[in-house]
Amino acid sequence: SRLPGIFAAPTTEPARGITGFVYRSIRGVTRKVGVGIDAVLRSVTPESAPDSSLQREVLLAALNGVVGDHLLATDNPLRITMSLRRDGVPLELTPGALSETIAQPSGRILVLAHGLCMSDLQWCRRGHDHGAALAADAGFTPVYLHYNSGLHISTNGREFSALLEALVAAWPVAVEQLVIIGYSMGGLIARSACEAARRSDRAWLGHLRDLVFIGTPHDGSPLERTGNRLDALLGASPYTAALSRVGKLRSAGITDLRHANLDDSEWLDHDRFAGQLQRRQALPLPENVRCHAVAGSLSKRSGALAERLAGDGLVPLYSALGQHRSPRRNLGLPESRRHVAYATSHLGLLDSPEVYARLHAWLNPANRSEEQAETAG
Protein backbone atom coordinates (compact mmCIF):
# COMPACT_ATOMS: atom_id res chain seq x y z
CA SER A 1 0.00 0.00 0.00
CA ARG A 2 1.03 3.61 -0.59
CA LEU A 3 2.81 5.25 2.33
CA PRO A 4 1.15 8.42 3.64
CA GLY A 5 2.59 11.76 2.56
CA ILE A 6 4.11 13.95 5.24
CA PHE A 7 1.07 16.23 5.28
CA ALA A 8 -1.47 13.38 5.54
CA ALA A 9 -3.33 12.62 8.74
CA PRO A 10 -1.26 10.44 11.09
CA THR A 11 -1.75 6.74 10.54
CA THR A 12 -2.41 4.26 13.35
CA GLU A 13 -0.31 1.60 11.63
CA PRO A 14 3.35 1.35 12.62
CA ALA A 15 5.53 2.81 9.91
CA ARG A 16 7.87 0.26 8.32
CA GLY A 17 11.24 0.19 6.58
CA ILE A 18 13.22 3.36 6.08
CA THR A 19 10.08 5.45 6.71
CA GLY A 20 9.67 3.79 10.08
CA PHE A 21 13.32 4.37 10.95
CA VAL A 22 13.05 8.10 10.12
CA TYR A 23 9.79 8.45 12.03
CA ARG A 24 11.20 6.71 15.11
CA SER A 25 14.28 8.93 14.95
CA ILE A 26 12.13 12.06 14.83
CA ARG A 27 10.12 10.84 17.80
CA GLY A 28 13.38 10.27 19.64
CA VAL A 29 14.42 13.83 18.96
CA THR A 30 11.04 14.97 20.31
CA ARG A 31 11.62 13.24 23.63
CA LYS A 32 15.17 14.57 23.98
CA VAL A 33 14.57 18.20 23.02
CA GLY A 34 12.59 19.01 26.15
CA VAL A 35 15.27 17.84 28.56
CA GLY A 36 18.32 18.00 26.36
CA ILE A 37 18.84 21.73 26.52
CA ASP A 38 18.75 21.78 30.32
CA ALA A 39 21.05 18.77 30.53
CA VAL A 40 23.56 20.48 28.29
CA LEU A 41 23.31 23.76 30.20
CA ARG A 42 23.84 21.97 33.52
CA SER A 43 27.07 20.55 32.14
CA VAL A 44 28.35 24.02 31.20
CA THR A 45 29.04 26.01 34.35
CA PRO A 46 30.86 29.33 34.66
CA GLU A 47 33.81 27.41 36.06
CA SER A 48 33.94 25.05 33.05
CA ALA A 49 34.22 27.89 30.52
CA PRO A 50 37.59 28.37 28.79
CA ASP A 51 40.40 29.90 30.81
CA SER A 52 40.85 32.75 28.34
CA SER A 53 38.65 35.67 29.33
CA LEU A 54 37.88 36.46 25.69
CA GLN A 55 37.08 32.83 24.86
CA ARG A 56 34.78 32.62 27.86
CA GLU A 57 33.04 35.86 26.90
CA VAL A 58 32.54 34.66 23.33
CA LEU A 59 31.13 31.32 24.49
CA LEU A 60 28.71 32.86 26.97
CA ALA A 61 27.62 35.57 24.54
CA ALA A 62 26.82 33.00 21.86
CA LEU A 63 24.95 30.80 24.33
CA ASN A 64 22.88 33.76 25.54
CA GLY A 65 22.07 34.75 21.98
CA VAL A 66 20.67 31.32 21.17
CA VAL A 67 18.86 30.44 24.44
CA GLY A 68 19.24 33.55 26.59
CA ASP A 69 15.53 33.83 27.33
CA HIS A 70 15.59 30.24 28.62
CA LEU A 71 18.64 31.02 30.77
CA LEU A 72 16.81 33.95 32.34
CA ALA A 73 13.57 32.01 32.85
CA THR A 74 15.44 29.19 34.63
CA ASP A 75 17.67 31.55 36.63
CA ASN A 76 20.72 29.90 35.08
CA PRO A 77 24.06 31.37 36.28
CA LEU A 78 25.22 31.49 32.65
CA ARG A 79 22.73 34.26 31.85
CA ILE A 80 24.16 37.69 31.07
CA THR A 81 22.94 40.67 33.08
CA MET A 82 22.91 43.93 31.14
CA SER A 83 25.62 46.39 32.06
CA LEU A 84 27.76 49.18 30.66
CA ARG A 85 31.41 48.16 30.59
CA ARG A 86 34.93 49.22 29.74
CA ASP A 87 37.59 46.59 29.04
CA GLY A 88 35.04 43.95 29.97
CA VAL A 89 34.52 45.34 33.48
CA PRO A 90 31.05 46.59 34.50
CA LEU A 91 30.85 50.26 35.43
CA GLU A 92 29.36 51.38 38.72
CA LEU A 93 27.12 54.25 37.69
CA THR A 94 27.92 56.80 40.38
CA PRO A 95 29.96 60.01 39.88
CA GLY A 96 32.66 58.89 42.30
CA ALA A 97 33.05 55.43 40.82
CA LEU A 98 33.12 56.73 37.25
CA SER A 99 35.76 59.32 38.17
CA GLU A 100 37.94 56.57 39.63
CA THR A 101 37.38 54.13 36.77
CA ILE A 102 37.66 56.46 33.77
CA ALA A 103 40.76 58.59 33.52
CA GLN A 104 39.92 62.08 32.29
CA PRO A 105 36.40 61.47 31.00
CA SER A 106 35.34 63.91 28.29
CA GLY A 107 31.96 65.51 27.83
CA ARG A 108 31.44 63.46 24.66
CA ILE A 109 30.08 60.04 25.57
CA LEU A 110 30.12 57.27 22.98
CA VAL A 111 28.04 54.17 23.75
CA LEU A 112 28.50 51.10 21.54
CA ALA A 113 25.96 48.26 21.39
CA HIS A 114 27.08 44.88 19.99
CA GLY A 115 25.08 42.43 17.88
CA LEU A 116 23.36 39.08 18.33
CA CYS A 117 25.40 36.32 20.03
CA MET A 118 28.25 38.76 20.63
CA SER A 119 30.05 40.40 23.53
CA ASP A 120 31.19 43.99 23.94
CA LEU A 121 34.77 42.70 23.73
CA GLN A 122 34.12 41.74 20.11
CA TRP A 123 34.06 45.35 19.02
CA CYS A 124 37.81 44.81 18.75
CA ARG A 125 38.48 42.89 15.54
CA ARG A 126 41.91 42.39 14.03
CA GLY A 127 43.35 45.01 16.32
CA HIS A 128 40.80 47.70 15.50
CA ASP A 129 37.98 49.01 17.70
CA HIS A 130 35.78 51.80 16.30
CA GLY A 131 35.17 53.06 19.84
CA ALA A 132 38.82 53.20 20.87
CA ALA A 133 39.74 54.84 17.57
CA LEU A 134 37.10 57.56 18.00
CA ALA A 135 38.40 58.13 21.52
CA ALA A 136 41.91 58.72 20.20
CA ASP A 137 40.93 60.74 17.13
CA ALA A 138 37.82 62.65 18.18
CA GLY A 139 37.93 62.96 21.96
CA PHE A 140 35.07 60.62 22.81
CA THR A 141 34.94 58.52 25.96
CA PRO A 142 33.66 55.08 24.87
CA VAL A 143 31.38 52.92 26.99
CA TYR A 144 30.24 49.49 25.82
CA LEU A 145 26.84 47.89 26.32
CA HIS A 146 26.92 44.22 27.32
CA TYR A 147 23.58 42.40 27.16
CA ASN A 148 21.78 39.10 26.79
CA SER A 149 20.92 39.15 23.10
CA GLY A 150 18.48 36.23 23.47
CA LEU A 151 15.88 38.44 25.17
CA HIS A 152 13.21 40.39 23.33
CA ILE A 153 14.56 43.53 21.65
CA SER A 154 11.99 45.69 23.41
CA THR A 155 12.95 44.20 26.80
CA ASN A 156 16.61 45.00 26.18
CA GLY A 157 15.71 48.42 24.78
CA ARG A 158 13.81 49.39 27.91
CA GLU A 159 16.66 48.26 30.17
CA PHE A 160 19.22 50.01 27.96
CA SER A 161 17.23 53.25 28.28
CA ALA A 162 17.29 52.97 32.08
CA LEU A 163 21.05 52.39 32.06
CA LEU A 164 21.63 55.41 29.81
CA GLU A 165 19.57 57.54 32.20
CA ALA A 166 21.76 56.44 35.09
CA LEU A 167 24.95 56.93 33.05
CA VAL A 168 24.15 60.50 32.02
CA ALA A 169 23.01 61.41 35.55
CA ALA A 170 26.24 60.04 37.05
CA TRP A 171 28.68 61.30 34.40
CA PRO A 172 31.42 63.16 36.32
CA VAL A 173 31.69 66.08 33.85
CA ALA A 174 29.09 68.07 31.96
CA VAL A 175 27.68 66.05 29.06
CA GLU A 176 28.25 67.88 25.77
CA GLN A 177 27.28 65.13 23.38
CA LEU A 178 25.91 61.60 23.57
CA VAL A 179 26.40 59.29 20.59
CA ILE A 180 25.24 55.70 20.21
CA ILE A 181 26.66 53.29 17.65
CA GLY A 182 24.67 50.09 17.21
CA TYR A 183 26.05 47.14 15.29
CA SER A 184 23.53 44.72 13.77
CA MET A 185 20.95 43.87 16.48
CA GLY A 186 22.55 46.58 18.62
CA GLY A 187 21.06 49.19 16.29
CA LEU A 188 17.58 47.79 16.88
CA ILE A 189 18.17 47.78 20.64
CA ALA A 190 19.18 51.45 20.38
CA ARG A 191 16.04 52.34 18.40
CA SER A 192 13.87 50.55 20.94
CA ALA A 193 15.69 52.36 23.78
CA CYS A 194 14.99 55.73 22.14
CA GLU A 195 11.30 54.91 21.86
CA ALA A 196 11.19 53.73 25.48
CA ALA A 197 12.91 56.97 26.54
CA ARG A 198 10.41 59.07 24.58
CA ARG A 199 7.44 57.35 26.21
CA SER A 200 8.85 57.68 29.73
CA ASP A 201 10.36 61.16 29.22
CA ARG A 202 13.92 60.10 29.99
CA ALA A 203 16.42 62.96 30.23
CA TRP A 204 19.21 61.14 28.38
CA LEU A 205 17.36 61.36 25.07
CA GLY A 206 17.79 65.14 25.14
CA HIS A 207 21.57 64.67 25.14
CA LEU A 208 21.58 62.27 22.19
CA ARG A 209 23.05 63.99 19.13
CA ASP A 210 23.92 61.11 16.78
CA LEU A 211 22.69 57.56 16.33
CA VAL A 212 24.70 55.37 13.96
CA PHE A 213 23.55 52.01 12.64
CA ILE A 214 26.17 49.60 11.29
CA GLY A 215 24.77 46.58 9.45
CA THR A 216 21.44 46.90 11.27
CA PRO A 217 18.53 44.87 9.81
CA HIS A 218 15.85 47.58 10.02
CA ASP A 219 13.56 45.48 7.84
CA GLY A 220 14.35 42.23 9.61
CA SER A 221 16.40 39.17 8.80
CA PRO A 222 15.69 37.02 5.74
CA LEU A 223 17.50 34.14 7.46
CA GLU A 224 15.13 34.21 10.45
CA ARG A 225 12.10 34.52 8.15
CA THR A 226 13.32 31.48 6.21
CA GLY A 227 13.80 29.54 9.45
CA ASN A 228 10.31 30.47 10.58
CA ARG A 229 8.77 29.31 7.31
CA LEU A 230 10.63 26.01 7.63
CA ASP A 231 9.28 25.61 11.18
CA ALA A 232 5.75 26.19 9.92
CA LEU A 233 6.24 23.68 7.11
CA LEU A 234 7.65 21.02 9.42
CA GLY A 235 5.01 21.68 12.08
CA ALA A 236 2.21 21.04 9.60
CA SER A 237 3.11 17.38 9.39
CA PRO A 238 2.67 14.73 12.11
CA TYR A 239 5.87 13.10 10.84
CA THR A 240 8.12 16.18 11.02
CA ALA A 241 6.56 18.18 13.85
CA ALA A 242 9.40 17.10 16.14
CA LEU A 243 11.93 18.86 13.94
CA SER A 244 9.87 22.02 14.23
CA ARG A 245 10.32 21.79 18.00
CA VAL A 246 14.09 21.75 17.53
CA GLY A 247 13.87 24.97 15.54
CA LYS A 248 11.70 26.52 18.23
CA LEU A 249 14.56 26.39 20.69
CA ARG A 250 15.84 29.65 19.21
CA SER A 251 15.56 32.64 21.48
CA ALA A 252 13.10 35.53 21.60
CA GLY A 253 15.90 37.80 20.39
CA ILE A 254 16.38 35.70 17.28
CA THR A 255 12.68 35.51 16.46
CA ASP A 256 12.38 39.28 16.95
CA LEU A 257 14.84 39.67 14.09
CA ARG A 258 12.32 38.16 11.66
CA HIS A 259 10.61 41.52 11.15
CA ALA A 260 12.84 43.72 13.35
CA ASN A 261 10.34 43.85 16.22
CA LEU A 262 11.04 46.85 18.43
CA ASP A 263 7.89 47.11 20.56
CA ASP A 264 6.22 44.89 23.18
CA SER A 265 2.97 44.94 21.19
CA GLU A 266 4.63 42.97 18.41
CA TRP A 267 5.05 39.88 20.58
CA LEU A 268 2.90 40.16 23.73
CA ASP A 269 0.01 37.66 23.79
CA HIS A 270 1.24 36.23 20.52
CA ASP A 271 2.96 33.06 19.37
CA ARG A 272 6.39 34.41 18.46
CA PHE A 273 6.94 31.56 16.01
CA ALA A 274 3.90 32.61 13.97
CA GLY A 275 4.84 34.99 11.18
CA GLN A 276 2.27 37.78 11.42
CA LEU A 277 3.80 40.76 9.70
CA GLN A 278 0.70 42.89 10.33
CA ARG A 279 1.61 43.18 14.03
CA ARG A 280 4.76 45.10 13.19
CA GLN A 281 4.80 48.72 14.36
CA ALA A 282 6.34 51.45 12.20
CA LEU A 283 8.32 53.23 14.92
CA PRO A 284 9.92 56.49 13.79
CA LEU A 285 13.50 57.47 14.42
CA PRO A 286 14.05 59.79 17.41
CA GLU A 287 13.41 63.47 16.75
CA ASN A 288 16.24 66.02 16.75
CA VAL A 289 18.86 63.30 16.42
CA ARG A 290 21.16 62.86 13.45
CA CYS A 291 20.74 59.26 12.33
CA HIS A 292 23.21 57.53 10.03
CA ALA A 293 23.39 54.07 8.45
CA VAL A 294 26.32 52.01 7.19
CA ALA A 295 25.66 48.95 5.04
CA GLY A 296 28.05 46.32 3.80
CA SER A 297 27.93 44.65 0.41
CA LEU A 298 29.78 41.56 -0.76
CA SER A 299 29.59 43.03 -4.25
CA LYS A 300 32.79 44.73 -5.35
CA ARG A 301 31.06 47.55 -7.14
CA SER A 302 27.95 49.68 -7.16
CA GLY A 303 25.19 48.98 -9.60
CA ALA A 304 21.45 48.46 -9.74
CA LEU A 305 21.60 44.66 -9.80
CA ALA A 306 24.43 44.46 -7.28
CA GLU A 307 22.65 46.75 -4.86
CA ARG A 308 19.41 44.76 -5.11
CA LEU A 309 20.99 41.35 -4.63
CA ALA A 310 24.17 41.71 -2.60
CA GLY A 311 24.03 42.51 1.08
CA ASP A 312 26.79 41.87 3.59
CA GLY A 313 26.03 38.15 3.73
CA LEU A 314 23.51 38.50 6.57
CA VAL A 315 21.71 41.81 6.11
CA PRO A 316 20.36 43.00 2.74
CA LEU A 317 21.48 46.41 1.55
CA TYR A 318 18.01 47.97 1.60
CA SER A 319 17.41 46.73 5.16
CA ALA A 320 20.70 48.12 6.50
CA LEU A 321 20.01 51.49 4.86
CA GLY A 322 16.49 51.68 6.27
CA GLN A 323 14.87 51.71 2.86
CA HIS A 324 11.40 50.26 2.32
CA ARG A 325 8.70 50.45 -0.33
CA SER A 326 6.20 51.47 2.33
CA PRO A 327 6.59 55.15 3.30
CA ARG A 328 5.63 54.21 6.87
CA ARG A 329 8.61 51.90 7.18
CA ASN A 330 11.14 53.84 5.14
CA LEU A 331 13.48 55.61 7.57
CA GLY A 332 14.07 58.37 5.06
CA LEU A 333 17.76 58.87 5.78
CA PRO A 334 19.33 61.47 3.46
CA GLU A 335 22.08 60.32 1.13
CA SER A 336 24.68 62.22 3.14
CA ARG A 337 23.90 59.98 6.11
CA ARG A 338 23.99 56.68 4.27
CA HIS A 339 27.11 54.79 3.27
CA VAL A 340 27.74 51.49 1.52
CA ALA A 341 31.05 49.70 2.07
CA TYR A 342 31.55 47.43 -0.94
CA ALA A 343 33.50 44.18 -0.77
CA THR A 344 32.74 44.13 2.96
CA SER A 345 31.05 41.34 4.92
CA HIS A 346 28.87 41.72 8.00
CA LEU A 347 31.76 41.05 10.37
CA GLY A 348 34.10 43.04 8.14
CA LEU A 349 32.15 46.19 9.01
CA LEU A 350 33.74 46.06 12.46
CA ASP A 351 37.32 46.61 11.28
CA SER A 352 36.85 48.26 7.90
CA PRO A 353 39.07 51.37 7.48
CA GLU A 354 36.43 52.73 5.10
CA VAL A 355 33.68 52.36 7.67
CA TYR A 356 35.81 53.99 10.35
CA ALA A 357 36.63 56.91 8.05
CA ARG A 358 32.91 57.45 7.52
CA LEU A 359 32.21 57.30 11.27
CA HIS A 360 34.97 59.80 11.92
CA ALA A 361 33.63 62.15 9.24
CA TRP A 362 30.11 61.98 10.65
CA LEU A 363 30.96 62.24 14.35
CA ASN A 364 34.12 64.33 14.73
CA PRO A 365 33.00 67.88 15.63
CA ALA A 366 35.96 69.27 13.70
CA ASN A 367 34.52 67.80 10.50
CA ARG A 368 31.01 69.08 11.01
CA SER A 369 31.18 72.85 10.71
CA GLU A 370 29.12 72.70 7.54
CA GLU A 371 26.30 70.92 9.41
CA GLN A 372 26.00 73.29 12.35
CA ALA A 373 23.05 75.12 10.82
CA GLU A 374 21.34 71.90 9.68
CA THR A 375 18.16 70.85 11.43
CA ALA A 376 18.62 67.36 12.84
CA GLY A 377 16.16 64.75 11.64
Image (tube, rainbow, N blue to C red):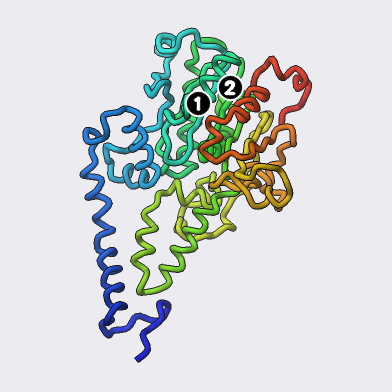
Say whether disc 2 or disc 1 marks the residue closer to the N-terminus.
1
Q: Is mark 1 on a helix, strand or loop?
A: helix
Tell me the amino acid under the disc marked 1: Leu
Q: Is mark 2 on a helix, strand or loop?
A: strand
312 in relation to 291, above or below: below
Q: Do the residues labelled 2 and 1 touch (CB within 8 Å)?
A: yes
Residue 370, picture quadrant: top right
Gap between marks 2 and 1, in whole Å?
A: 10 Å
Pointer 1 residue: 164
Q: Nearer the viewer, residue 215 or 147?
A: 215
Q: Residue 279 carries which label?
A: none
Tell me the amino acid under the disc marked 2: Leu
Q: Which residue is drawn at 42% across and 15% down?
A: 94
Q: Residue at x 36, y 47 (%)?
A: 67
Residue 248 rendering spot, x and y as whole percentages: 39, 57
50 relative to 376 in the view: left or right: left
Pointer 2 residue: 178
2 vs 1, front mark: 2
